[in-house]
């Protein structure tokens, strides 16, 4: 830990003790505004004293926070009026003062109260608008992109905006129902429905959808939730990865990175505005009880003997937060409704649930050469348990399985891997190289420190490729950069990875809260995930902003999303430091020749050329003005559906890969039906993937060159 970080922790611990003594004998509910001010001041202190590269807390920062907070609340510009936005300008130069404590906290309450008022007003519009049939013959249109919209000038302008939005949604549903009628008209027992009936059904469906939309918004935007969003906006304005977590969200973050949590072992889904059981995890409390069934609707969720919460209109993510807990053996009570209308309350005790879908897994791709494929969704580490899941150990096991099967090359798939544990990525990279630096880390005002693999042994020394895309971030980028810098393998995928080159650490705002006899659970102020270091490649450049450029680039649909680090205005800048001392890997193939050949082949490939063309065409749809005339809408829809169909066909391999399990996994997956089903889906996804197929071709070339060298 940075030495400069310790005084800040001391300040927070002292502040936590002060809060503990001040709150002894009362709850924070007595004065929630006072608690919020404490949270805000301590967040401000932490940002200024410990952030890697803090922005100055001045009027320009205040103005940016205000802009971002309005976007957070109403990014679609459907709730506020322009007069509201104008009234918020009074806070452009005061939010920084509120953070420092030199001005009373007012902005979030004024904006939040007005937001909830406008939300109530807006939620009363849709019922009457959807009560009458729409005229789809009129030649009007709608703009969807919020960046091209202004806030409504007045209520009449807002009514018109909402009318068009509802009309567009109803038109889309109406055309879908017409298409469904046409597709099923020759089926036995088909019941023909007139256009007037379909139009009415379309409006009814939209009414349910919008009703749930507003219910969810209202559930999410209590005063506490809005304050939490306000603090989160402040931290995100400092940089995109400095976050504020209220207590329950901090727990969720820890669960994500550990790969396990305490719950009941039931997966939920939304079905027609209802929360239902989609599946049960074998061995979990819900499965063991025998009382919960797939398709049961959850009506209420209770914690022990506390009053249960009615989850009607809740988002699935919010219901999950209520079900999960921080301790094994605690009680959760579910009031459920069966398909036959029976209502029942079920009591379950939470237990540890492992998110095995996020763990490393492997298969063998058989063809010209035998190639191992390992998928790693994230760099997980269960830091609370000495024997908990560690991705480096799991990947080592998968590599060993593949070695036992005599594979000639290995693919590591890090696509959509958002990162995770920094120590784990260092250990994992060490499986493929001899001892040496994996990355460099630099704190604020400090010299860079190397993170080294100190184990001279190499688990696997054969041909290696790493698959990435725009969503490969953080720890994924460290791994890919190390493999690239050592020339240990080739990186294949999008033009570059995400570009997150910063290191975060969770800092509780009152560190003594867990162990202090004076602090109630309700007095937990939450946690800040703080950016306090930057990491750099061993070659010296940061992965921040630029990411890791692929050696071999394949057209990718995510390329057009503009959702990488470089697309975020608050992202920290790129820089570089001195190169570390390391030796590149002695390959038995010509990497430059393989890269040149593969890129040339992809550029001239009819399939990838057509894929890029279709992706370009779809990307342009974001700039469209959408017609609300049914004739024009259908014409546009036909063209778009044809493009998507062609795109879907391009993503299907003409000849699927031959994919099998290794012998150890074959015995394991056959142990129960659920494992068999998951394994089947995994294999199906691998054998039809055009990107994996292209990577296999590169691997074959690497192996062939190695064989040629050995022959000589």
Image (cartoon, rainbow, N blue to C red):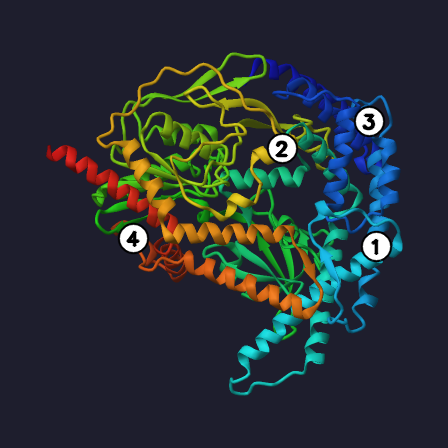
3D distance between C-alphas at marks 1 and 3: 32 Å
Q: CA distance from mark 4 to mark 2?
A: 40 Å
Mark number, residue 661: 4
- Within-10-Å neighbours for mark 3: few <14, some 14–19, many 20+: many
Marks 4 and 3, the one that precedes in the sequence: 3
Q: Is residue 298 left or right of residue 662?
A: right
Label 4 or label 1, whichever comes before in sequence order: 1
Label located before the other in sequence (4 or 2): 2
**Is 700 placed above or below 244 here?**
below
> Which residue, given by chain and number where applicable, does mark 3 sit on?
98
Q: Are marks 4 and 3 in contact (CB under 8 Å)?
A: no
Q: Quadrant of residue 538?
A: top left
Give the number of the disc on residue 240.
2
| Circles 2 and 3: CB atoms closer than 8 Å | no
Query: Could you say which disc has been placed on residue 11 in the image?
Result: none
**Which element type, helix, strand or loop, lies under badge 2?**
loop
């Amino acid at each position: 830990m940075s030495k400069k970080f310790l005084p800040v922790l001391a300040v927070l611990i002292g502040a936590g003790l002060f809060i503990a003594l001040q709150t002894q004998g009362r709850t924070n509910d007595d004065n929630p505004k006072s608690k919020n001010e404490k949270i805000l001041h301590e967040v401000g202190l932490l940002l200024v004293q410990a952030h890697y590269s803090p922005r100055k807390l001045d009027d320009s920062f205040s103005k940016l926070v205000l802009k971002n907070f309005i976007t957070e609340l109403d990014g679609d510009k459907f709730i506020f009026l322009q007069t509201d936005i104008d009234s918020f300008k009074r806070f452009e130069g005061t939010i920084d003062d509120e953070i420092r404590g030199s001005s009373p906290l007012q902005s979030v309450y004024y904006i939040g109260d007005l937001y909830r008022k406008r939300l109530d007003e807006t939620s009363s519009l849709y019922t009457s608008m959807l009560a009458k049939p729409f005229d789809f013959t009129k030649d009007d249109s709608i703009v969807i992109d919020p960046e091209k919209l202004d806030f409504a000038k007045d209520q009449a302008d807002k009514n018109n905006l909402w009318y068009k939005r509802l009309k567009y949604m109803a038109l889309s549903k109406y055309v879908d129902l017409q298409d469904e009628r046409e597709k099923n008209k020759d089926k036995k027992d088909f019941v023909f429905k007139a256009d007037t009936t379909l139009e009415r059904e379309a409006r009814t469906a939209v009414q349910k959808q919008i009703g749930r939309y507003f219910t969810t918004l209202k559930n999410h935007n209590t005063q506490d939730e809005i304050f939490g969003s306000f603090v989160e906006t402040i931290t995100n304005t400092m940089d995109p990865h400095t976050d504020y977590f209220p207590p329950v969200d901090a727990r969720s973050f820890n669960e994500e990175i550990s790969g396990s949590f305490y719950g009941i072992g039931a997966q939920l889904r939304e079905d027609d505005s209802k929360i239902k059981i989609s599946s049960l995890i074998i061995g979990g409390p819900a499965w063991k009880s025998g009382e919960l069934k797939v398709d049961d609707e959850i009506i209420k969720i209770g914690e022990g003997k506390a009053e249960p919460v009615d989850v009607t209109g809740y988002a699935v993510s919010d219901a999950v937060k209520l079900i999960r807990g921080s301790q094994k053996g605690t009680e959760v009570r579910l009031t459920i409704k069966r398909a036959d209308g029976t209502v029942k309350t079920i009591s379950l005790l939470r237990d540890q649930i492992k998110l095995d879908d996020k763990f490393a897994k492997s298969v063998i791709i058989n063809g010209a050469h035998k190639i191992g494929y390992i998928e790693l969704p994230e760099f997980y580490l269960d830091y609370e348990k000495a024997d908990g899941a560690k991705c480096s150990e799991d990947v080592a096991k998968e590599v060993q399985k593949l070695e036992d099967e005599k594979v000639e090359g290995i693919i590591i798939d890090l696509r959509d891997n958002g990162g995770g544990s920094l120590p784990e990525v260092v250990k994992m990279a060490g499986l493929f190289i001899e001892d040496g630096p994996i990355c460099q880390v630099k704190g604020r005002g400090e010299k860079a420190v190397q993170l080294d693999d100190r184990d001279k042994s190499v688990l696997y020394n054969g041909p290696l490729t790493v698959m990435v895309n725009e969503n490969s971030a953080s720890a994924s980028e460290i791994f890919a950069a190390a493999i690239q810098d050592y020339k240990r393998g080739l990186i294949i995928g999008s033009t570059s990875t995400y570009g997150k080159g910063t290191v975060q650490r969770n800092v509780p705002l009152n560190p003594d809260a867990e162990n202090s006899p004076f602090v109630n659970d309700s007095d937990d102020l939450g946690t800040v995930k703080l950016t306090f270091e930057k990491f750099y490649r061993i070659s010296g450049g940061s992965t921040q902003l630029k990411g890791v450029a692929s050696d071999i680039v394949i057209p990718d649909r995510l390329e057009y999303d503009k959702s990488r680090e470089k697309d975020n205005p608050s992202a920290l800048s790129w820089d570089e430091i001195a190169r570390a001392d390391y030796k590149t890997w002695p390959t038995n193939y010509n990497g430059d020749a393989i890269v040149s050949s593969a890129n040339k082949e992809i550029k001239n490939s009819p399939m990838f050329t057509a894929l890029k063309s279709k992706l370009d065409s779809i990307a342009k749809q974001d700039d469209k003005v959408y017609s609300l005339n049914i004739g024009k809408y259908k014409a546009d829809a036909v063209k778009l559906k044809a493009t998507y169909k062609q795109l879907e066909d391009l993503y299907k391999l003409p000849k699927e890969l031959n994919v099998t399990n290794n012998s150890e996994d074959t015995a394991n997956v056959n142990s129960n039906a659920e494992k068999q089903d998951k394994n089947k889906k995994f294999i199906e996804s691998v054998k039809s993937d055009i990107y994996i197929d292209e990577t296999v071709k590169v691997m074959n070339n690497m192996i062939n060159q190695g064989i040629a060298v050995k022959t000589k």
